[in-house]
Each structure stands twice: as C-alpha cells, then as structure tokens.
Amino acid sequence: MAKNPLWELHQYGQSLWLDNIRRGLIASGELARMIEEDGIVGVTSNPTIFEKAIGGSTDYDAAMRALVDQGLNADQILEALIFEDIRLATDLLRPLYERSEGRDGFVSIEVSPHLAHDTQATTEQARRYWRAVDRPNLMVKVPATPEGLPAIQRLTAEGINVNITLLFSIERYAEVMEAYLSGLEQRIAEGQPVTHIASVASFFVSRVDTAVDRRLEALLRGVEDPLQKEQLQELLGRAAIANAKEAYQRFKRVFTSARFAALREKGARVQRPLWASTSTKNPNYRDTLYLEELIGPDTVNTLPHQTILAFKDHGVVRGVTLEDDLDTARESLDVYGPKILVCGKQKRSTSGSSPSAWVG
C-alpha cells in the first residue's frame, strides 16, 4: 500500500478527526475504513452537517417513518435521529477511545446555535445531550460566546467533555482556557476526579482568511501606490495561519504553567487546540494549506472529506510547522491591526437550522 501522509501527522502528535457524520457513512463501513486506513480518530458534527445528511439522503427514511408512527413531533424526530448517529459513531470509536486512554475516539454534538447567548439554556441542553447519548467518548460543543464561557466552566466542573467551538480571537481563547482551568479546579475542590475529562478549543481557520482577505482587497482597491499595493498583497492568505500559530504559543504557556502542573498532578489533561474550518475557501490557495502549516503536538485537525482526500493524494508533512517563522507570524498580526484582523465577533448564520425545517 502506498504511503499515506495522513498517518505521518500522528507521528508529530496531531490527531485527525472527520468533520462529517451520516447514517450511511457508518452503516456502509466507510467510517470504519477511514479509522483503519486513514488514521481518523474522532468525529465532529454540527447542525448544518445533520441538515445536509437528513435532508439530502434517503439514509433516514425508514427510521423517520418509524418515529412518525410513534407520534413524535418534528423536533423529537430530529433529536432521535441525531442521537442515534452519535451513539453509533461513539460505539464505533469506543475501542480507540479505550486504547488511547481517553485521548481520542470522541464524537462531538453541538448545542443549538439559537442558545449561543443564553448561558442557562446552553448548560441545560448540554446536560440533556450528555445524559441522552450516555457515552464517555461524547463531546458537547459549546460556542465561545461571552455567555458560553460560564457554561464551559460549569459543564467541565460537572465532568462533561466540552468542545469549545467558533473561536476566532486570541483574546477569547485566553478566556476559554481560563474557563476550562477554573472548571477543573472547581471539580477538584469538590473532591471529584478529573482524569476522564477531555476538552478541545476549536479555532476556525479559513474563515479568518476569508474575512481578513476581504478587508485587504477593499483596501487594495483604494491604493494607487505600487509599493503599498505590493505590501498589502503580501498579507493576503496569511492571517489565519499567523493567528493559529500565536494561539498555539498561548496554549503552550498556559499548559506548561505552575497552575496547570498542580492540576496535572491530579490527572488533568491539557485542553488541546483543534483547527476547524480547514478546507481552503480561496481557489488560489493550496487545498492542503491549513494542514501542512498547522502541524504540532497536542493538536487536533478536523477535516471534511474533500480535504482528507486531497491531503492523502498530495499532502506534504514537513514536521512541526506550528513552530516555523513565529517572528514573521507575530509581525503579520501586528501589521494587520485591529482594523483588519478578525476580532472574534463573527456571528454564525442560523439559516436553515430550524429543527422542524430539517425534518420537513
């Protein structure tokens, strides 16, 4: 069998998760094949993924008819379908979860984006999802909104695995790490174990370049000076990687601190950075860009199918690239400045996320 560069990433401490889920993917054995052959060790999902899976395939028709016959309403049917997919995937990944001693083998389910600005409702839904799926290798995705931060701390203190999603800015990332550490400290203070708790902080990568490039292109249209134009053009496509590299340095500082050392003695795990939205949106950029430039220990990269296939075909592993050209990355962030750099205030579109609409 030809050498698969996806497996090489594991040699540098990076885990690969699949950013997709569908009943047919599991039932056909394709997910099992990806675990075995491509080194996939986790799965992430979101409302849009389930909307496409349920509305765009016949995979769920029989199950849906059975649920309708039970008298369930549209929202209840949707949840039942989602929970079953998540359980099937967690069960498939459970042996890997056990072998890795709880490092990998996770499947993520996301709380409703409609609750992103409601701490109590987010917390309650996360608890309900945790109880309903009832698998130790479940992660519940909570958005990194100001209202999400207290929920992250509370859920961590309750022993629930949290995937913090929709992270863009370094400033918000510092608050996310604080919420995780505080949740662990609270749990330890209550005499509860922390050895089983896992968490990831999901930085959205390509969306940063999309937003920053749009602003740079607007500036370029108003510049006549050739030198200024050249300087602005050199900044295109660099913000996302620079932002992720700076985040990784913050991660290392926090999780090598004396504060975390005390938690590690109690069995606590680091909250790994997860690189999300890693398919390139700009056709001028290499389609494996956000894998090749973001390789490093204690990180996760969650990938859609097309990016997995692209990297398997022509991906290049050059070692720990997250540590490359850090001075240049910081200089880039300084040059972008607050008027250009994304500040983490983007809002996720909830178009098409009505549960009733998904079921039809």
Image: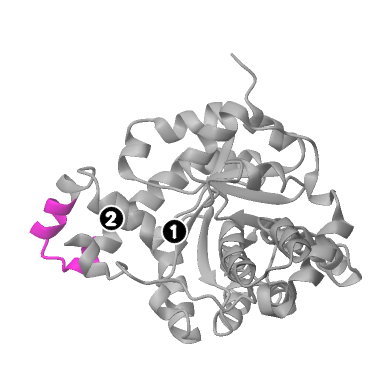
Is disc 2 placed on a helix, strand or loop? Answer: helix
Q: Is residue 175 left or right of residue 66?
A: right
| x and y, in percent, of residue 34 in the image | 50, 32
| x and y, in percent, of residue 230 in the image | 74, 58
Residue that carries the numbered disc 2 in the rendered image: 81
Q: Is residue 105 magenta?
A: no
- Disc 1: CA contacts within 10 A as few (<14), some (14-19) or many (>=20): few
Q: Amino acid at mark 1?
A: Asp
Q: Amino acid at mark 2?
A: Leu
Give the main secondary structure of the magenta stretch.
helix
| x and y, in percent, of residue 190 in the image | 69, 79
Q: Which circle, 1 or 2, is nearer the viewer? A: 2
User: In the figure, 206 relative to 169: above or below?
Assistant: above
Circle on res. 71: none
Residue that carries the numbered disc 1 in the rendered image: 134
User: In the figure, 340 relative to 65: above or below?
Assistant: below
The span shown in magenta is 64-77
Say which label, 1 or 2, has the lower sequence index.
2
Is disc 1 placed on a helix, strand or loop? Answer: loop
The residue closer to the viewer here, 318 or 86, is 318
The residue closer to the viewer here, 86 or 205, is 205
Q: Quadrant of residue 156?
A: bottom right
